[in-house]
Image (spheres, grey):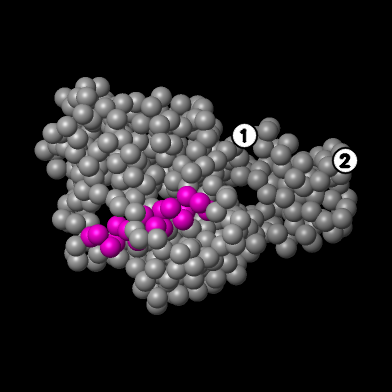
């Protein structure tokens, strides 16, 4: 069970958490983030956003006013909960928790999965369950064991990146935009007015595509558009890209960058990738879409399908608690409003892979940090019950499995 630790002054929270990770591991992580933040401005901003939890922890203690911000206050609570958990775990559990924290400080991983685990445990304690950290304490394949009214259920806390559901990946787009920025500045220097380069990328845009048949890489797209601008072409089409450069009305150049991007966002929707380059006399906007709609919900479905065979024992009802990463609040809200996530979750629950699963829940980092909007349900999560599971109607499990929408 989760218990609040003895009061740890906010000034000591950083050191207490860093001790769990190891000072050398923590210092190495900060150096890695700093190194990756030396890239172009857009990539650097994305790196800082993805690793905002680590950077925020390292800035502790915050000014007195900071905990008034919901995300800062919630992160403080989660840090305290992790510290409390470590103090109560047996030696093997402390070791596994340390491994999980270190894994979150490696390569492109984050600490969000560790805090997701603690948050899911807290939610179920608040719902009246006794929570045992079976994964940490016992090395179980699932993470949490819930008990209530003589009934037990296994919970798997898992994370899936929205990038796996995008043909045009956000990281690749930002890399491309940083690469081509100097070219666009030179191109604008001899021109006045506003321009929009629309791109449809049927084969996608990814950091590691082997060749154009697998989709474009940022370098490939940079070279193609650079050649297009040098030749003065306004249109170029092939299987990998449909490119069209058009002048915009004079008012667009005078409206300011934020206004132009907001207008394009309203016109093109949350799935479009946008960026803007401007100078005193003109503006060059770019908008890209894949050849098909994003399939973030389908990516969550695929991830859920892969979990039961290895993460659930099948001897108790199973619950999958999914955290969707790399998605902003606009795209998350759109995903919920279109019922895409609900449709994919319910489609998963009627399939053979969900035979041992009584419910699934989904949340984003916004919910993790206490920024849930009106579209999420109880506890800031979407939850869907599997009506075909024998335990779906048990009153003891109802607070953990009843559909929230």
| Of residues 155 and 267, the one drawn nearer to the viewer in this rendering | 155
398 sits to left or right of 237? left
Indicate whether residue 86 is drawn in magenta. yes
Q: Position of residue 61 (x, y in %)?
A: 53, 65
Q: Which residue is mark 2?
A: 250
Q: Position of residue 300 (x, y in %)?
A: 37, 39
Q: Which residues are magenta?
A: 72-89
- The answer to whether residue 389 is seen in the rendering is no
On whether residue 151 falls in the magenta region, the answer is: no
Choose the circle earlier in sequence order: 2 or 1: 2
**Helix or strand or loop: what does disc 1 sit on?**
loop
Rendering coords of residue 238 (x, y %): 59, 43
| Residue 299, image quadrant | top left
Q: Residue at x 59, y 59 (%)?
A: 64
Q: Position of residue 60 (x, y in %)?
A: 52, 65
Q: Quadrant of the C terminus?
A: top left
Report the residue at 29% width, 61% height from top. 86
Query: Which residue is located at x 47 percent, y 53 percent?
Result: 75
Report which quarter residue 98 is drawn in.
Answer: bottom left
Judged from this view, the residue extending furthest toward the bottom is 24
Q: Mark 1 highlights which residue? A: 269
222, 65: nearer the viewer: 65
Marks 2 and 1: which is nearer the front?
1
Left or right, 68 with reference to 297: right
Q: What residue lies at 61% left-to-right and 56% top-to-bottom? A: 65
Pick whichever, 152 or 390, lies toward us: 152
Q: Are marks 2 and 1 in contact (CB under 8 Å)?
A: no
Tell me if residue 138 can be seen: yes
In depth, the one of 391 and 345 nearer the eye is 391
Q: Is residue 115 left or right of residue 238?
A: left
């Amino acid at each position: 069970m989760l218990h609040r630790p003895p009061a740890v002054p906010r000034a000591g929270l950083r050191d207490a958490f860093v001790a769990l990770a190891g000072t050398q591991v923590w210092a190495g992580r900060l150096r890695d983030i700093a190194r990756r933040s030396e890239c172009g401005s857009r990539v650097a901003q994305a790196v800082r956003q993805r690793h905002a939890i680590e950077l925020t922890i390292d800035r502790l203690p915050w000014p007195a006013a900071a905990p008034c911000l919901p995300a800062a206050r919630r992160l403080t609570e989660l840090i305290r909960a992790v510290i409390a958990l470590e103090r109560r775990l047996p030696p093997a559990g402390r070791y596994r928790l340390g491994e999980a924290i270190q894994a979150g400080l490696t390569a492109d991983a984050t600490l969000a999965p560790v805090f997701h685990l603690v948050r899911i445990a807290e939610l179920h304690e608040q719902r009246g369950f006794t929570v045992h950290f079976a994964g940490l304490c016992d090395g179980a394949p699932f993470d949490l064991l819930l008990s209530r009214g003589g009934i037990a259920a296994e919970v798997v806390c898992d994370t899936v990146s929205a990038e796996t559901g995008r043909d045009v990946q956000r990281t690749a787009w930002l890399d491309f935009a940083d690469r081509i920025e100097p070219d666009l500045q030179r191109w604008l220097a001899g021109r006045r007015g506003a321009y929009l380069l629309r791109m449809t990328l049927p084969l996608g845009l990814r950091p590691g595509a082997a060749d154009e048949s697998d989709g474009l890489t940022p370098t490939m797209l940079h070279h193609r558009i650079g050649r297009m601008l040098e030749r003065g072409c306004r249109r170029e089409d092939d299987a990998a890209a449909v490119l069209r450069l058009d002048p915009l009305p004079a008012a667009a150049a005078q409206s300011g960058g934020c206004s132009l991007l907001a207008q394009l966002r309203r016109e093109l929707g949350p799935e479009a990738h946008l960026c803007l380059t401007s100078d005193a006399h003109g503006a060059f906007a770019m908008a890209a879409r894949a050849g098909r709609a994003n399939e973030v919900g389908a990516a969550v479905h695929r991830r859920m399908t892969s979990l039961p065979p290895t993460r659930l024992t099948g001897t108790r009802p199973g619950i999958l608690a999914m955290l969707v990463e790399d998605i902003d609040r606009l795209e998350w809200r759109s995903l919920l409003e279109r019922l895409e996530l609900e449709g994919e979750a319910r489609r998963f629950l009627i399939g053979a892979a969900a035979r041992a699963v009584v419910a699934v829940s989904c949340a984003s980092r916004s919910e993790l940090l206490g920024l849930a909007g009106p579209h999420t349900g109880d506890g800031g999560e979407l939850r869907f019950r599997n009506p075909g599971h024998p335990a779906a109607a048990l009153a003891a499990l109802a607070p953990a499995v009843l559909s929230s929408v």
